[in-house]
Amino acid sequence: MIRRLVDIAVSAAALSLSAPLLLVAVLAIRIESRGRAIYRQRRAGKDGVPFDVYKLRTMVDGAEHVGAGLAVNANDSRITRVGALLRRTSLDELPNLLNVLRGEMSLIGPRPTLPVQVAQYTGRQRRRLEIKPGITGWAQVNGRASLRWAERIELDLYYIEHRSLALDLKILARTPAMVLGGSGVYKGQAGGWEGRL
């Protein structure tokens, strides 16, 4: 209950404060390329229940149906100029706050993943679905997309097994540096998901 109250208070305040920035980003996206500025994608939530995650669109409209499909690499030609800036600063994730308000996500937890990824989980890896997905998390502040997929899952499982106020505060303390540094946005040589775990 306390976590939920904190989620509501912080996400509502963050959305209010970031509203002007979100408006500018939406206008920039619409000016540069056709299509909706807010992108929705089906993800797996707590206990595997599907929900639509909200993000600012950073790629050309319909990008998931061309090129590398759901995989996104550095210098991907589908990423728009505005999108590259939004990704580098993680501003594209701001609409995730709506998911937090709706109760589908939390501020801290494993990043929400695609149902096709969840379908490949082992029994142990399915424990990743025991809590709500988050905007930031232990795997996020320890390398995020640059890590191998199985390694990211293990970090998320570590968080679930050692979840505490102290660990949450450590994640929150590390998150600004991760965002401002722009590290781990893309999978690099060994990281990311390649359609298998």
Image (cartoon, helix red, strand yellow):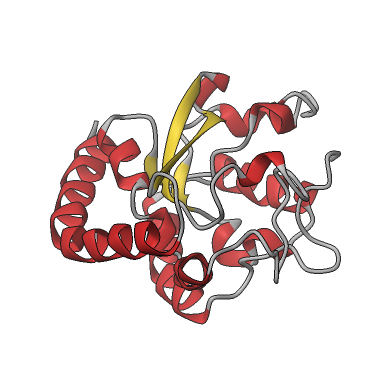
- The total number of labels drawn is 0
How far from the left and from the top, in percent, is residue 29?
39, 60
How far from the left and from the top, in percent, is residue 75?
70, 71
The quadrant where residue 118 appears:
top right
What residue is at 55 percent from the left and 40 percent from the top?
Answer: 160
What residue is at 17 percent from the left and 64 percent from the top?
Answer: 20
Q: 190 left or right of 62? A: right
Considering depth in this image, is 108 or 40 the residue closer to the camera? Answer: 40
How far from the left and from the top, in percent, is residue 194?
83, 47
What residue is at 65 percent from the left and 66 percent from the top?
Answer: 143
The quadrant where residue 54 appears:
top left
Considering depth in this image, is 67 or 86 the residue closer to the camera? Answer: 67
Considering depth in this image, is 54 or 182 the residue closer to the camera? Answer: 54
Q: Give the answer, above or below, for where 58 lies relative to 114.
A: below
Q: Give the answer, above or below, for where 16 lies relative to 99.
A: below
Point out the image quarter for the N terminus: top left
Q: Is residue 166 visible?
A: no
What residue is at 80 percent from the left and 28 percent from the top?
Answer: 120
Q: 38 left or right of 153? A: left
Q: 114 left or right of 190? A: left
Point out the image quarter for the C terminus: top right
Q: 152 left or right of 48? A: right
Q: Is residue 50 visible?
A: yes
How far from the left and from the top, in percent, is residue 18?
21, 62
